[in-house]
Amino acid sequence: MQDVKTYISEHRERMIQELIEILKIPSVSADPAFSQDVFHMADAIKKSLETAGCDLVEICETAGFPIIYAEKTIDPTLPTILVYGHYDVQPPDPIDLWSSPPFEPVIKTTELHPDGAIFARGACDDKGQMYMHVKAVAYMISTGQLPCNVKFMIEGEEEVGSKNLAGFVKNNQEKLANDIILISDTGMIANDIPSVTTGLRGLSYVEVEVTGPNRDLHSGLYGGAVANPINILSKMIASLHDENNRITIPGFYDRVAELSQTEREAMAAAPFDLEAYKKALDIDAVYGEAGYTTNERNAIRPTLDVNGIWGGYTGEGAKTVIASKAYAKISMRLVPDQDWETITELFKTHFEKIAPKGVKVTVTRHHGGQGYVTPIDTIGYQAAEKAYETTFGKKPVPQRGGGSIPIVSLFEQELKSKTILMGFGLDSDAIHSPNEHFGIWNYLKGIETIPYFYQYFTEMSS
Ligand code: BES
Ligand code: MN
Ligand code: MN
């Protein structure tokens, strides 16, 4: 892999331009208005894997958006790496807050990305990171340096809960057989502090509806005499945390794996600047569960957050009204060994129970999944560590992440293999937010580091 740096400098402009092209396709999986674009995006990924030199590239239709499967087999006795990524993106809203249109990529420099960053929805999550793998494999194939077999599985429904991927994985265990799964869909601490994500949180996502009177009422004629669903919903939500910011749902913490003092100390050793964190978010204090640090709160502790709440009159001016209904969308981030379906049931039972007389409550579950922890005493982790050491000049910090990729625990269950999460994004890259971007340096560093993972993993496996 000696020539990877030279290769990247020679192909830099082309590799950036090709990423820009796929970022122009608005593959928003959540919004049916973009459905054609999502299919179009699947075709573009298929072409890029063919161009990269894979022997077999298939578009696997599902009840939703297709899964792209590809492989390059050089010798069945050598190890096989399965690369997973997603080509769908989050909706770009609120569009007004973007400084340039979300599907018209532009390169701008930022404080953290002095070499420039590509601004576009999906730049980091996950088109840019997924594409690093396509480019890294293209490099290895074209220079005759692919040291092992590789398979790709790139889906188009990650941002909406990977509904059809689970069935695909269960039905294609042999096809997807592998020695390790490699994913770049997370982040790292900083460009000079590489890290490998060693854990993901699970998720339970629910929607609640509180119904009071059978119609919207005059807030003077009826105010004070009937339950106002918005007031009640607010009260119910407020009661879900106690004064220590612990979640009050009975049984919620029963299965939470507590970390040992040694593990907590190891976590605390990872570089973290609380002042810079507050400054970046323009907040004067952090907030969360008593007894835990910020890094613990957003990685090893479970949460319950309202993601959206609505009801009543929200238009211009004032309207005196008591709404018939109020709604909220609530996510719970879960940690090992919480089971997302059990937690969803606990939530439902509790939320229905705390509803006062005078309102009706319904709880609908959306999607969810289990958390995941990657052990670090495996050759997979050690190969990743060595790859970062080669290209960054220092060992990566193992770090549990707060986000979720629910399909990862299913991979372990169905394919019996571990996942290595080599993320090259930064928390400040604004994934899911307006002005999402991905550093050019990060993109190229990913392309440079991935081939070393292949090399070391193959060497360590023999
Ligand atoms: N790539 C993210 C997850 C992520 C980002 C994990 C950064 C760790 C660090 C993924 O695309 C995502 O957004 N997942 C969703 C869950 C999904 C079921 C919609 C999430 O975490 O909200
Ligand atoms: Mn993602
Ligand atoms: Mn995402």
Image (cartoon, rainbow, N blue to C red):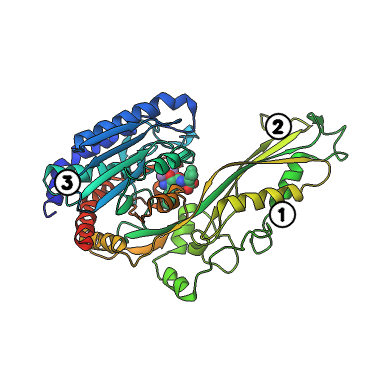
Dot 2, how many residues are within 10 Å of its Cα: few (below 14), some (14-19), or many (20+)?
Answer: few
Dot 1, how many residues are within 10 Å of its Cα: few (below 14), some (14-19), or many (20+)?
Answer: some
- Residue 202: percent from left, percent from top: 51, 53
Give the residue displayed 46% in from the left and 52% down from the top: 403
Q: Nearer the viewer, mark 3 or mark 2?
A: 3
Say left or right for 260 vs 155. Answer: right
Mark number, residue 313: 2
Residue identifier under label 1: 239
State the CA–CA distance, disc 3 to disc 2: 63 Å
Give the residue displayed 76% in from the left and 50% down from the top: 353
Q: Nearer the viewer, mark 3 or mark 1?
A: 3
Nearest to the observer: residue 35 or residue 318: 35
Say which quadrant the C terminus sits in.
bottom left
- Residue 278: percent from left, percent from top: 49, 58
Say which quadrant the N terminus sits in.
bottom left
Residue identifier under label 3: 74
